[in-house]
Image: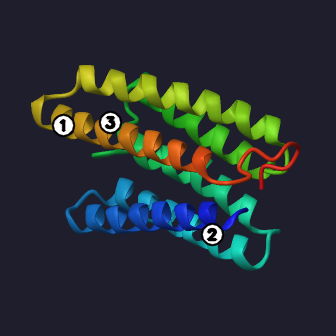
Amino acid sequence: MTQPLLVLLAVVGLTWLTSGLALVLWGTRTAGTLAALAGLGAVAAAAAGATDRSAAPALLVLSGALLAPLALACFPRPRWQHPLDFLALTVLAGCGVVATLSWRSVDAVSSLGLVSAVTLFAHIWWRIEQSGDRERRSLQWMALFAAAALVVSGLLGFASEDVLTPGCPW
């Protein structure tokens, strides 16, 4: 990974870590813990990418494909009693685990990432529609900031040098 990409990854990781810790302090334990772990994984991936390239991709996939989507799906509180909640959490966890185990395959990680993204988007939309006013407001703010962070991270990632190296995403 290039130096600007490692810095971006560390900044995003620290943001997730501090946000997760703040959520834990405010009582949103499940989503906060998952977010903090996702941030810790991203920071560890940046550190590994700066020193040893072998562990960085696996840590990045673990953080981005498993922990971060589950953190977003469990915000502000986890719900799994309804069949759609249970299905969404199962799909997200399954895709994350399989992507983490097959981190060397760019095609597998990309395909599972697409399934996770569509599932997460649909699940959050459904929860916004089904929730009461207070939870709906929390979900709308979370969706707004997650979308903004995704756009900014994507733009900065594409603007950095050598991100799209053919055959080697890491």
Q: Amino acid at mark 3?
A: Ala
Q: Earlier in the sequence, mark 3 or mark 1?
A: 1
Q: What kind of element bears circle 3?
A: helix
- For mark 1, what is the residue? 135
Q: Position of residue 162 (x, y in %)?
A: 74, 52
Q: Residues within 10 Å of mark 2 (few under 14, many from 20)?
A: many
Q: Position of residue 57 (x, y in %)?
A: 74, 59
Q: Is residue 9 above or below residue 137?
A: below
Q: Is residue 79 above or below residue 114?
A: below
Q: Quadrant of the C terminus?
A: bottom right
Nearer the observer, 44 or 162: 162
Q: Quadrant of the N terminus?
A: bottom right
Q: Residues within 10 Å of mark 3 (few under 14, many from 20)?
A: some
- For mark 2, what is the residue? 46
Q: Earlier in the sequence, mark 3 or mark 2?
A: 2
In this rendering, position of residue 21 left or right of residue 41? left
Q: Amino acid at mark 2?
A: Ala
Q: Of the residues tagged 1 and 2, which is closer to the observer?
A: 2
